Amino acid sequence: MNDGFDFAFDFDLDELAPADAASEEAVERFWSGDLTALSQHHTTPNGSHSFVVAHDQSATWGAPGAPQVMAIAVTRDLTRFTYILETSHHATVPFAQNWLVERGCPLEKIAKVRDGLLKPADDLTVWVERQIRESGARYEVLDNHTSDFDPCETWTLTRDSRAAEAPIRVFHEEWDHGAGTYTMREGAFADIDAARSWLDDRGGPLPEPPEYSDGNGAVVRARVARMALARSAGASAAPKADLDAIRTPPAGPVQPPVQGRLL
């Protein structure tokens, strides 16, 4: 197996049996015709594991607001001829990548996404996405929503287990199809009611987390500036190449109304 993006969702399961009832149920529900691979990693040489982030086209005509990004993890036991298949839906690619990393996928392998997608609009977007991917079990996802039409956006409502203040965090992603870009921002709230009130009313800017420092995001902007400087100085040689990999895919033709960063 390889990590190219011509993936046709052949998990090589024909001669294997599901290891448990959950895997049997998952494979019965699985319909690869609705999926387009966005990021993937397959172990070699024995092919014991596959990790895939995909766009689920079927979600666009399902329940309004349903997440359209699917994470897929396959574990094969080639001595017992069995497999475990797990899937999970997410509003955004970084949360799907995080889910796969938590299941053993190398971060730098799943961080690279295919060409032809919308690009991050700025370095702050890159920084926030990297924070999500590398967060481990830090964020408990409470709810999410995806909108294909005006506004073209997703949001993910979470609880930050590390936050001393304003532990309810909203990750808001907004797409600009005309520019071929998207932005991701993090907002902080004291409780769920306050977060939902902002999501319902949008009466002001998304409140920045207290750890962004002086209210103007000085701390985060300094980190983002250092990140951009490192990249321009040749960060491709740095151990954490995932940041560059996620930042550089060119914006190819975008066909709305599917999830903005996808196809």
Image (cartoon, rainbow, N blue to C red):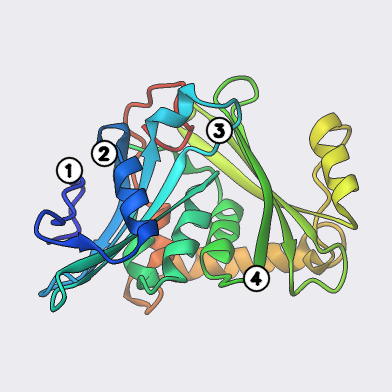
The Cα atoms of the two marked residues, 1 and 3, are separated by: 27 Å
Residue 32 is marked as 2
Q: Which residue is tagged 1? A: 8
Q: How crowded is mark 1: few (under 14 residues within 10 Å), some or many (20 or more)?
A: few
Which residue is labeled 4 in the image?
A: 138
Relative horizontal placement of residue 200, taking residue 184 as reference (left or right): right
User: Could you say which is closer to the camera, residue 260 or residue 46?
Assistant: 46
Left or right of 102? Residue 11 is left
Q: Give the image quarter of residue 200.
A: top right
Question: Which amino acid lies under the numbered mark 2 shown in the image of this protein?
Answer: Ser
Q: What's the residue type where badge 4 is placed?
A: Arg
The residue sitting at the front extreme is: 21
Crowding at mark 4 (Cα within 10 Å: few <14, some 14-19, many 20+): some
Q: Which amino acid does label 3 sit on?
A: Trp
Label 1 – label 4 distance at C-alpha: 33 Å
Q: Position of residue 104 (x, y in %)?
A: 38, 74
Q: Which of marks 3 and 4 is nearer the N terminus?
A: 4
- Above or below — where is 178 with respect to 183? above
Q: How crowded is mark 3: few (under 14 residues within 10 Å), some or many (20 or more)?
A: many
Q: Answer with mark 1 or mark 4, whichever residue precedes in sequence.
A: 1
Q: Which mark is residue 175?
A: 3
Q: How far apart are marks 3 and 4 (CA)?
A: 26 Å
Cα–Cα gap, marks 3 and 2: 26 Å
Task: Write the residue at 48% across / 37% down.
Answer: 68
Residue 223 x, y percent position in the rendering: 64, 69
